[in-house]
Amino acid sequence: MAEPLLKIDLSEDGIATLTMSRPGKRNAMSDKLLAEIDAFFSNPPESVRAVVLTGTEGHYCSGLDLAEHEQRDAEGTMRHSRGWHAIMDKIQFGGLPVVSAMFGAVIGGGLELATATHVRIAEPSCIFQLPEGRRGIFVGGGASVRVGRILGADRMIEMMLTGRKYGAEEGKTLGLAHYVVGEGEALAMAQDLARKIADNAPLSNYVMIQAIARIEDMSKTDGFFTESLCAALTQTSPHAVEGLQAFLQKRDPSFT
C-alpha cells in the first residue's frame, strides 16, 4: 500500500498532529492529500480535542500540484473548486480548534488551507504568496473570501496581480500569521497552544468556532442577537458553573 500523505499522530492529551508529507514536492496539494485531510476532518477520533496541522522538509504547503493538474472543463473546474470549499469549511467549522505550524512555502492553496485554521504560527522561513495571477488562473480554494477578509480586497488584488511574496513578520502584521517564532519552534508552540485550547470548555470552543466568523457576515443587529444566543447557551451550561467555581476557588477548571 502507498504511504499516507497525511501522517496522523494522536497524543494521550487529545491533540492530533497532522503532518502533510509529500517529499520533494514542498507538500504541494494533490487530490489524494486533500482526500486524506477530508477523511480526517469528516470523522475525527472522539478523543481529539484540538488539532495541529503542519508540513515536512521545511515547507507547510506550496499549493496545488501543477504537475498533477487535471485539465477540466468549466463545469468540472467549478465542481473541483466547490469540493475544496467543502473541505476547507470542515476545517474551519468542524468544531475542532486547528493550529497551523507554518514554515517555508505557504503558497496558493497552502495559504487557503492555513487561513481555514484558527491559529497560525510562522517561522522566519515562511513565504506567503498567491501566484495564481502570474499563472493565468484565479484562486479556487477559498482565498477570495478567507484571505480577502484578512487582507482586504485592495491589498489582495495587488498581491495577486504582482505575485508579491510576504515574509513571516509582514504576514504577522497583515494577519496571515498570529505569532512569529524562531526557526524550528513553530511545531512545539502549536502543540502547546493546542493543549491550552483543549483545556477550555468544549462548548465554548465550539461556539466560538461556529459563531464569530458567521457574525462577521451579519448586520450589526443580527450579530448582537446571535451574540446573546451564544452567551445564553454557554453561560447556562455546566461548564460555566465549573469555570466560575474554579475562579472563586483559585484553581484550574476541570471541563469534561
Image (spheres, helix red, strand yellow):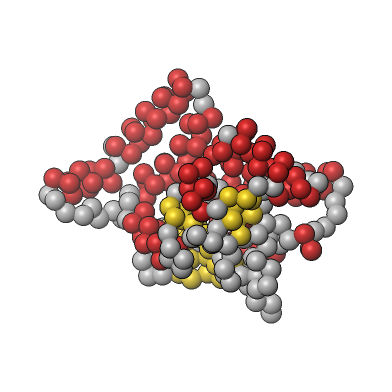
On screen, residue 114 versus residue 108, left or right, reads left
Quadrant where the image shows the C terminus:
bottom left
Residue that lies at the very extreme toward the left in this rendered image: 249
Q: Is residue 101 above or below residue 208?
A: below
The residue drawn where x is 42% and y is 41% is 208
- x and y percent of residue 45 in the render? 48, 63
On the rendered structure, is 40 left or right of 118? right
For image coordinates 30% across by 41% down, the residue present is 237
Horizontal and vertical percent for residue 144? Answer: 65, 39
Residue 71 appearing in the image: yes
Percent position of residue 213, x then y: 50, 37
> Where is 78 relative to 38, above or below?
above
Can residue 43 be seen?
A: no
Instruction: Give the residue drawn at x 28%, y 53%.
Output: 255
Observer-nearest of 203 and 102: 102
How many numbered marks are there?
0
**Which residue occupies the foreground of this view, 171 or 79?**
171
Left or right for 249, reference 15:
left
Residue farthest along the bottom direction in this orientation: 1
Which image quadrant for residue 152? Answer: top right
Which residue is nearer to you in this view: 95 or 179? 179
Answer above or below: position of 174 versus 117.
above
Give me the residue at 61% from left, 36% from top. Answer: 155
Q: Position of residue 113 (x, y in %)?
A: 59, 52
Question: Which quadrant is home to the N terminus?
Answer: bottom right
